[in-house]
Image (tube, rainbow, N blue to C red):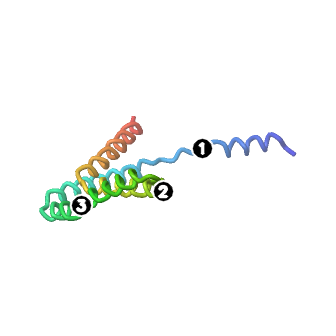
Amino acid sequence: MNISKLAIEYSALEEPKAVDKTPLLRTREGELVRIIEAARRVVSTEEWGTLKKLIFDKLVENLERNLREEATKDNPSVAALAKINGQLIWARKYADLSKLADVYRLELTNVKKTLHEKEE
């Protein structure tokens, strides 16, 4: 058995190959810009205001009430609390498109930062 040959093969397996993620980051950057712009346009419409008022605001209020009711029980269910809390987080996130756009803006900032670091 040739140990030097095994050592060369082993070192070839260990070396991680650098994968250029720039094209993926550029694609994601474009998607994020479109998402942010779309959210901004939708928020400014009367229709979104109607949906927000009639559906999403009430949904958040109902989930908050359910969470309070479950939490104040003598023996609250941890699973039910976790489920309602997860639904509440989701509802808050999507009920306010401005906040959702802020989340995507933060991701866009991170993508741009990563791309800028790669260029240096």
Q: Residue furthest front?
A: 74
**Nearer to us in this view, 2 or 80:** 80
Q: Earlier in the sequence, mark 3 or mark 1?
A: 1
Disc 2: CA contacts within 10 A as few (<14), some (14-19) or many (>=20): few
Q: Amino acid at mark 1?
A: Pro
Image x and y of residue 41, in percent? 17, 58
**Nearer to us in this view, 24 or 8:** 24
Disc 3, SS: helix
Image x and y of residue 66, in percent? 34, 57
* Residue drawn at x 36%, y 42% as measured from the top left: 110
Disc 1: CA contacts within 10 A as few (<14), some (14-19) or many (>=20): few
Closer to the eye: label 1 or 2: 2
Question: Can the viewer see residue 89 in this picture?
Answer: no
The quadrant holding residue 35 is bottom left
Position of 74 compared to 40: left or right? right
The residue indicated by pointer 3 is 58
Q: How many marks?
A: 3
- Circle on res. 4: none
- Say above or below: 54 vs 9: below
- Circle on res. 16: 1
Quadrant including the C terminus: top left
Q: Amino acid at mark 3?
A: Lys
Q: Are marks 3 and 1 in contact (CB under 8 Å)?
A: no
Q: Earlier in the sequence, mark 3 or mark 2?
A: 3
Q: Are marks 1 and 2 in contact (CB under 8 Å)?
A: no
* Residue drawn at x 27%, y 61% as measured from the top left: 59
- Say above or below: 22 vs 54: above
Image x and y of residue 83, in percent? 43, 57
The residue indicated by pointer 2 is 79
